[in-house]
Image (cartoon, rainbow, N blue to C red):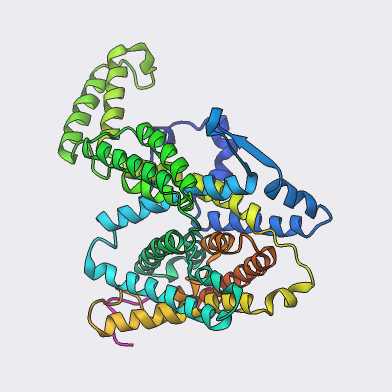
Amino acid sequence: MAGPKLPTAADLAQPEPIEVLSRPFLRFASLSAAGGLVLIVCTVAAMLWANSSAHESYHHFFHVEKLTVGFAELTLSKSLGHWINDALMALFFFVVGLEIKREILVGELASPRKAALPIAAALGGMIGPALIFVAFNTGEPTLRGWGVPMATDIAFALGILSLLGNRIPVSLKVFLTSLAIADDLGALIVIALFYTEELATNYLLYAGGVTLGMITLNALRVRSPWVYFFFGLALWYFVFKSGVHATIAGVVGAMTIPASARVGAKGYLTATRDALTKFESLSESPDHDVTTSGEQRASVWAIHKSSLQVMPVLHRLEDAIHPYTVFLVIPIFALANAGVELHGGLGENLLNKNSMGVVIGLFIGKPVGIVLFSLIAVKLGVASLPRGVSWRHILGAGCLGGVGFTMALFIGNLAFADSPDDLTHTKLAVLVGSALSAIAGLAILATCRKQPAQVSTEA
């Protein structure tokens, strides 16, 4: 996650006309809930399109029309929906991988004591919904969808949490973020182990070789993002051909991205001060154009290079790509996958074992599992509640954990790719279960009072 925004030189200057025109959009994009709002709009648009008189165009556009990419023998021809789910979503999973690595190295998952509570909560939030789904679907072909209600949509959950503003302690946001990231890691393991059909071991070996090459690049301190990009393309192709879902390549690739800086704080300060001193000594007037001075341009470039060298590639990529995943990748995914064509009415599509397992798994299984496993971890003494967080906060966050949406729809596509009716029921159940969870979480947290200081870990 990016830190607080500091003013740049452009912020201190007179705004350009394009900046004035784009200011409302930039302000909207800066809102914590903005990504969730865009996601909701695309979901509603998909539902309206799929159930309108133009419903055939929706299915044809995303799931019938082929898009061919490649050259020579490396050509791939897939529907637009497949490209979105297999390729575009790999970018989303790449950012997820970067977040997981950052949290493990320097975040809330770096310390065993701090990581214990969100990991325990995530584990309970996966086991609880899965058991409920299995209870509904034992002996049924739909049992394959047991992984659907296990997922938490971090963007949606945090967006809803942000609506409560200062009523919610920062420590709860950190807890929910860490829980969702640990949940994502668990979901990725489930996808890799249980939703892979047939393995082509030769391509899997090729993918392993590319991964080893990327690890070697990291060990040699290669820090150019473009080098990792081209290796990442090869990794994605080999993973795609291997039979493992191609988005796993995004996570694997993210784990090889350098997380250390080229220079430390002291070196950065020294080099930047020298460059600024040189720049200032050459200033003829406060507003003159630096392009008139070659030495000043050199000073600016020195500062630019030093800034790149002090920021790890992992953080640079996460900050650069994250907005595109929030405002482009995930909304496009929702538009392509959330369009459920209803036949027979809402009740008929929900009153079946598959749908009930998903809805109750998300709405009941998630909060029960999260609270129960958190309570066990605290009682065993391996974890403690974050400062300012009560058990009511944990229950509310547990309900928000039931907002599965993106990951739940994704796993549903894998589980029921060959069963259109079951996939329709799953998608609708994910939407309903996520909506109920969001409402419940918002209602519970709205009644919470911010804790004054340290809260007891007693239930």
Left or right: where 380 falls relative to 255: left
Does residue 387 sit above or below 290 in this rendering? below
Does residue 319 sit above or below 182 in this rendering? above
- Which image quadrant: the C terminus? bottom left
Does residue 176 sit above or below 62 in this rendering? below
Left or right: where 145 falls relative to 43: left
Magenta-colored segment: predominant secondary structure: loop
Magenta segment: does it hold 451?
yes
Q: Nearer the viewer, residue 191 or 209?
A: 209
Residue at image position (62%, 68%) is 426
Residue at image position (52%, 49%) is 89
Report the magenta residues as a range.
Answer: 448-459
Rendering coords of residue 313 (x, y %): 31, 40
Rendering coords of residue 330 (x, y %): 55, 52
- Toward which corner of the image does residue 126 lie, by quadrant? bottom left
Q: Nearer the viewer, residue 250 or 380?
A: 250
Q: Is residue 1 visible?
A: no
Rendering coords of residue 28 (x, y %): 55, 50
Q: Is residue 75 visible?
A: yes
- Toward which corner of the image does residue 76 lie, by quadrant? top right
Rendering coords of residue 61 (x, y %): 72, 46
